[in-house]
Amino acid sequence: MKTSVAVLAEKLGNNCSVWRSSTGYALTLEGIRLWGDQLGEARHDALWVCDPDDAEQLARAGASVAVACGEDENADALADRLFAKSGETAEILVAHTKSANELANRLMDVKEALDAWDAALTEEIIARKPLQNILEIAVKQLANPVAVFDETSGLMSYAGEVSGDYQETIWGVVLDKGRAPVGYYTAEERTQISANIANSAVPTIIRPKRSPLHENLSLCINEDGQVLGMLAQVDLLAPFDSAQISLAMHVRDRLGEMFRTTIAGQHHRSPIGHTLRLLIQGDTVEERIVRYQLERKSWHINDRYCLAVMPLPDNSDSPYSNPYRAEIMLAYPGSIVIDQDRYLVILIHLDQSQPTASREEFIEMLRHRDSQDIPCGVSDEFEFLHARSAWRQARIAVREGNGNGRKGVSTYDDVFFSDFLHQMEQTTPLDVPLHPMALRIAQSERGDEVLSCIFAYVMNGCNVSRAARALYMHRNTLEYRMTSIQQRWSLDMNSMDEDELLRFALSCRLLMQQSLER
């Protein structure tokens, strides 16, 4: 594992060693080497152990140096002098030991112990052990307690014994309620904190608002700029030193590997994507978690959203492979893209303040894709917690449309009646809920023609002129037909109340659809 000179100095003991570094807690050193003239050029990823006679030469070359000095020498002064000789770019460690050989052996023992710890940590991650198991190993080197807040689930795991008065702090909620305090920081506070930790290589000390003396060392676990989790070290009694920060960064990087490859057994590129997957699977999701995740993008539960799906074929060389998914994300910036049950799923936030961010605009963008031969289905608008219904609508649209929608895009509006009819047929015979007059007309000669006239007439407010335009028919022709229909069937639609008239019109439409499907 890579480590820092700060960690090595701490393990030797502060009473016998001092260190100087231009990078502080950065993880730069991969090994310990005893310097000798026969070794030639000094590698910059190793800490070279030497006597004071060779130290200045190595420091001038910019190499990291560990110097063995006698008990009577001033270690601080020597470290300062060598650091200055390096142009303040090298890693300098000065320790009181008998010889360079002894110092090298001690440092190699420290490095070996750290490597063994890292190997155990890595083994647990490769084995996909629970986060709690991994933290139990991590805590052996980190200050207690250590916690990971999983942004995808809103839960916190921790290891180590919490000592001191933790009440009225972030730990009071974690320990008493067994979960992370979602909403502990307001959206405005989170934005301010996020701005401070934009550089994932630099940790941030966060002082919880309920107890200024209680410090939280926070490090982002992220992928492509998306925060997947937060590693936190909480110390109720003492501030963090550079060695602990360095080790915490190493654990953060190791946990990042786990978060990128498996969260709840699957790969999730974003917390919202993970929550979307849970919703469309029908799993229970706490509303407070959803609200928290959406607010990170300045979205809200009651905003309007739209869902589009595209089927994924079996062959990996298809346009639905990873490059194509990346293309989708570039084509629809700000969208959430996941795959579910062999579908590519695109979630779009419809910003009502932006006229171009509408469902109609999104559909037009889909219709101008390069690969218009790829079928696509689009749901109605929905609120976020209703994602499961939208997921079903979009799948029905792509299945029923079968690529025959305009430029390969079918909307649920297009297939609503056929789907509604199918659902009714699955639950009860059509002659039960449909209007009896519509059933009689459907069974007559040229019944479909009569039904279409009635449906257009009712849906256009019983206005003959508008209905005729909808049917591409002359007004006089439709007026004649409507008079004939009313006389033949003794049908007085003007005497029907609104509910009966709507049932009648809907029955006509469903019977027309049923006739088309025969």
Image (spheres, rainbow, N blue to C red):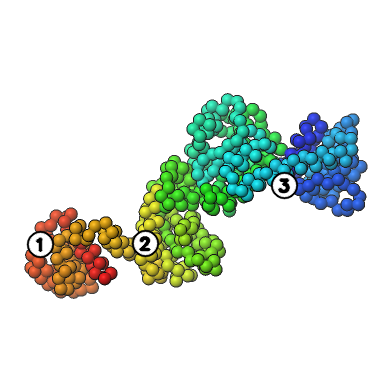
Q: N-terminal of the two: label 3 or label 1?
A: 3
Q: Residues within 10 Å of mark 2 (few under 14, many from 20)?
A: many
Q: Is residue 52 above or below residue 297?
A: above
Where does the image place residue 509, in percent across and percent down from the top left? 23, 64
Q: Quadrant of residue 94?
A: top right
Left or right: 107 with respect to 130?
A: right
Q: Report if residue 186 is visible in the image.
A: no
| Number of marks drawn | 3
Where does the image place residue 473, in percent across and percent down from the top left? 20, 73
Left or right: 408 with respect to 221?
A: left
Q: Residues within 10 Å of mark 3 (few under 14, many from 20)?
A: some
Numbered badge on residue 396: 2
Q: Are marks 2 and 3 in contact (CB under 8 Å)?
A: no
Q: Residue at x 44, y 56 (%)?
A: 348
Q: Quadrant of residue 495?
A: bottom left
Q: Is residue 210 above or below residue 452?
A: above
Q: Is residue 482 above or below residue 42?
A: below
Give the residue type that dot 1 points to.
Answer: Asp
Give the number of the mark in front: 1 or 2: 2
Q: Residue at x 59, y 33 (%)?
A: 207
Q: Residues within 10 Å of mark 1 (few under 14, many from 20)?
A: few
Where does the image place residue 465, in percent across and percent down from the top left? 18, 68
Q: N-terminal of the two: label 1 or label 2?
A: 2
Q: CA distance from mark 3 to mark 1?
A: 86 Å
Give the residue type that dot 3 points to.
Answer: Met
Q: Residue at x 73, y 44 (%)?
A: 115
Q: CA distance from mark 1 to mark 2?
A: 37 Å
Give the residue type that dot 2 points to.
Answer: Ile
Q: N-terminal of the two: label 2 or label 3?
A: 3
Q: Quadrant of residue 171?
A: top right
Numbered badge on residue 1: 3
